[in-house]
């Protein structure tokens, strides 16, 4: 099986953390999202993967090289962003015309067995087959209306809630026939959701299947935190502690916690549940980290509490600090002693913060 992974988006909704790394390299339980995806592709029987890259292409290309998990990797690099269909056309030569292939939105975390979708696709002789998920809020997704035989009659991108034809959402996982290349113009941005799927639905060539199990995208900060949580619940229930971790007396490490290599945890600190601590991080005395993601190399001083937040690489957090729900602290930022960032506060990389911020705001 061949697969294309769309890996070139800017990840604007995850700024400022996406200013310094592509979204697909964001760690989920201390491993880049793209590693989880590549692992799953290998398990589903994929042997060749095209990574369609644009934003911070070099970082992805250098990180993965030309093979991983027994699969060959090809990097299809865009000069300018081509949207969600343009990169497929650009990779036409690499994909070839021999067989149907898989396309994945790279910002999805799932435990889906991709080979099942391939099987369904070949049974129906469709041009394209979409994996679908039942969702609560259809207005955030591309929504499909199906016949009893799973043919998509209508595909509408982000319909208003009251006009949604169903709650079956595009899961960002497709199987496409090489015929698809004729539907995508060359060299310009094209959206598969807006320009290609509605046309295929009109021509009765689009099918869809819903599935259950682990699935979420990491588009927004709350989705990113949720992805970590879902993975803990599905796969990593007990805590995992890396190599050369030093833990002082009275420390409580709760379930659903992943602690990277060479972390130091000071006396009477509490870590978890749902905490990911990146490698080389230092936690002082009586620190409390819960439902949060701490990137590598962060220093968190004594008596500080971090709940529901994301802390960027090598940030320095002072003592007696409180950081609350939905806060995102950029790489190398400095939060001084006694500061309270109560909710939804975003701090840009390398910014120093000395004052309390009690309402959602971006500190540039
Ligand atoms: P936002 O800017 O926050 O909307 O994120 P995004 O740029 O990643 O956009 P979106 O979430 O809609 O992208 C869905 C998937 O398509 C992600 O895996 C992106 O990496 C990928 N993607 C989006 N635009 C492009 C593009 O122009 N080129 C390539 N190769 N991939 C893209």
Image: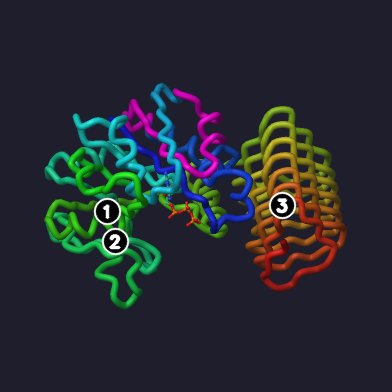
Task: Identify the disc placed on residue 210.
Answer: 1
Using a 10 Å C-alpha cutoff, classify the residue at mark 3 as few (fewer than 14 neighbours), some (14 to 19) or many (20 or more): many
Secondary element at image label 2 = strand
Answer with the quarter of the image where residue 290 lies: bottom right
Compared to residue 68, the image places residue 321 above or below, namely below
Q: CA distance from mark 2 to mark 1?
A: 7 Å
Answer with the quarter of the image where residue 159 lies: bottom left
Answer with the quarter of the image where residue 222 lies: bottom right
Q: CA distance from mark 3 to mark 2?
A: 38 Å
Q: Are marks 2 and 1 in contact (CB under 8 Å)?
A: yes
Q: Is mark 2 within 8 Å of ligand 1?
A: no
| Residue 194 within the magenta-colored segment of the rendering | no
For label 2, the residue is 168
Secondary element at image label 3 = loop
Q: Residue 234: x and y, percent?
A: 47, 46
Q: Earlier in the sequence, mark 2 or mark 1?
A: 2
Q: CA distance from mark 1 to mark 3?
A: 40 Å
Give, as a single range, the part of the protein colored magenta: 42-66
Name the residue rendered at 51%, 38% in the picture. Answer: 57
Task: Identify the disc placed on residue 174.
Answer: none
For label 3, the residue is 349
Quarter of the image with the C terminus is bottom right
């Amino acid at each position: 099986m061949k697969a294309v992974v769309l890996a070139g988006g800017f990840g604007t909704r995850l700024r400022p953390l996406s200013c310094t790394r592509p979204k697909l390299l964001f760690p989920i339980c201390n491993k880049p999202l793209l590693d989880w995806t590549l692992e799953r592709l290998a398990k589903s029987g994929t042997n060749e993967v095209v990574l369609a890259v644009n934003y911070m292409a070099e970082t992805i290309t250098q990180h993965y090289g030309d093979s991983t998990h027994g699969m060959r990797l090809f990097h299809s690099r865009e000069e300018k962003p081509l949207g969600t269909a343009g990169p497929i056309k650009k990779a036409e030569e690499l994909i070839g015309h021999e067989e149907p292939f898989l396309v994945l939105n790279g910002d999805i975390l799932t435990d889906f067995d991709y080979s099942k979708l391939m099987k369904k696709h070949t049974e129906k002789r469709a041009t394209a087959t979409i994996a679908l998920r039942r969702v609560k809020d259809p207005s955030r997704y591309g929504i499909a209306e199906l016949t009893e035989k799973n043919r998509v009659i209508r595909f509408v991108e982000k319909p208003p809630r009251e006009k949604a034809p169903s709650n079956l959402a595009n899961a960002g996982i497709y199987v496409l026939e090489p015929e698809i290349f004729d539907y995508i113009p060359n060299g310009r941005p094209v959206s598969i959701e807006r320009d290609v799927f509605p046309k295929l639905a009109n021509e009765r060539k689009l099918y869809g299947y819903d599935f259950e199990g682990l699935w979420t995208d990491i588009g927004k900060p709350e989705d990113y935190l949720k992805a970590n949580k879902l993975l803990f619940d599905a796969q990593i229930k007990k805590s995992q502690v890396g190599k050369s971790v030093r833990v002082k007396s009275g420390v409580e490490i709760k379930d659903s916690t992943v602690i990277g290599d060479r972390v130091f945890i000071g006396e009477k600190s509490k870590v978890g549940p749902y905490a990911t601590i990146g490698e080389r991080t230092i936690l002082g005395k009586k620190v409390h980290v819960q439902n949060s993601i701490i990137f590598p190399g962060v220093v968190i001083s004594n008596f500080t509490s971090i709940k529901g937040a994301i802390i960027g690489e090598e940030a320095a957090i002072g003592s007696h600090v409180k950081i609350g729900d939905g806060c995102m602290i950029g790489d190398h930022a400095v939060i001084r002693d006694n500061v309270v960032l109560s909710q939804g506060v975003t701090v840009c990389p390398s910014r120093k913060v000395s004052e309390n911020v009690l309402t959602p705001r971006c500190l540039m």
